[in-house]
Amino acid sequence: MRRREIIKSIGLGTLFLATNQLLPSKLFGTVLQSQKKDLKNWAWISSGKGKDIDYWKKKLENAKANGIDSVLLEVYNSRVAFYDTDRFPVEEDILSKFIPLCKSIGLELHAWMWTMPCNVDKIVKEHPEWYVVNGKGEPACEKPAYVDYYKFLCPCNEEAQEFIRGNVESLAKINEIDGVHLDYVRLPDVIIAIALQPKYGIVQDREYPQYDYSYSKSCREQFKAKSGIDPLTDLTDPSANKEWRQFRYDSVTNLVNDKLVPTAKKYNKKISAAVFPNWENVRQDWKNWDLDCYMPMLYHNFYNKDISWIAECTHKEINELKNPRPLYSGLFIPELTATEIKIACTKSVEAGASGISIFDLNSMDEEKWSAFKMVSKLN
């Protein structure tokens, strides 16, 4: 689900902690003194439209003063671009405003792009074969799961791969940015987070074919060439076939490692991604990706978990990485109190995180910034 829409739709109250779970306030100012110099903090910026330079100058200076080192600016949202490009319709060139601002303030700037979804009308109309297909044989460009924008491209289709690779290249070629940040680099959720299921009136106690992707012609042909099996017609229960499941994991991993990472590196850009803690449900085996860093979205409310789950996931995911690289715990700020921000940040770093990534900058207020700064590397 799209994070901005979830804020409006989920309707969950903040999960408060019992008194005995609260950490002593003195700890927040002294935690991990020896590691502070190595910590790095990030902020996603999901909407930069319609704001002038003075507005963003104040926002970014405040972020820097409170411990943010790098910003992830959304520059392509699967429909329109917010940078100068001829690949998509351009709604507003926000990136050109941020480049000099971030440089003057001392913030890294990473261009955040949607990876697999493509809702550009021209692409949808001219290239329906580029899109994923569910277990009922329904293409996402005609009948997307859950919401209209879930029109995902197929990771096995060579032309779709090249289109996505070209999107990364169009950003990586911009000299003034520090990196490219991938979002939605996955397949549609075969099982959405449990707290979101009531919104759609569904119970996903197993993998159902209408949410299971991808059975595109490209995926089926490639899997059959490898295994002798057509997953759409030869398997009674595709979800039970380990080889078919692994094939989907590998299809996304190969796109990242063989196409997207080399493209970013060609232009000496860092490459990162926002990733899921329940990676199996979106076929996103990111522990095997060759990224510079990882930002798992540890939004505990979506999974009906308490705040201790954030640190548990952080520890688990760091230990599962194929190549040890920095991992930054992603926090969903709208559902966190200031006290919970302190706890989530502190426990994440204690669990091994190299810092924090907050979603998003516009959700921070004075009280939350104060809490964040208390446990940032500034103290």
Image (tube, rainbow, N blue to C red):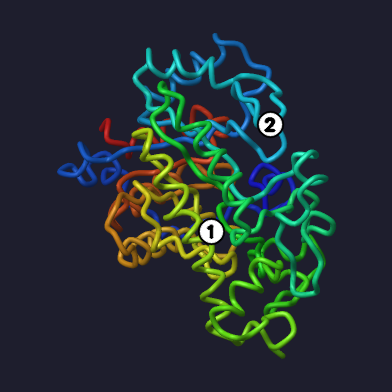
Q: Position of residue 8 (x, y in %)?
A: 73, 44
Specify few, some or many for label 1: CA neighbours under 10 Å numbering under 14, 14-19, or 20 or more.
many
Q: Is residue 341 above or below residue 131?
A: above
Q: Earlier in the sequence, mark 2 or mark 1?
A: 2
User: What residue do we see at 69% from left, 24% from top?
Assistant: 90
Residue at coordinates 53% horizontally, 61% vertically from top-left?
Answer: 252
* Disc 1 residue type (three-letter): His
The residue to which callout 1 is attached is 300
Where residue 348 sits: x, y (%)?
A: 35, 53
**In what quadrant of the picture does the C terminus appear?**
top left
- The number of discs equals 2
Cα distance in 3D space between marks 2 and 1: 34 Å
Q: Amino acid at mark 2?
A: Phe
What element does badge 2 sit on?
Answer: loop
> Which residue is at 36% across, 40% downward?
265
View extreme (left): residue: 34
> For residue 268, which quarter of the picture?
top left
- 26 and 260: which one is in front? 260
Residue toward you, 174 or 38: 174
Which residue position is annotated with label 2? 88
Location of residue 257 with respect to 43 vertically, above or below: below
Q: Position of residue 248 (x, y in %)?
A: 56, 70
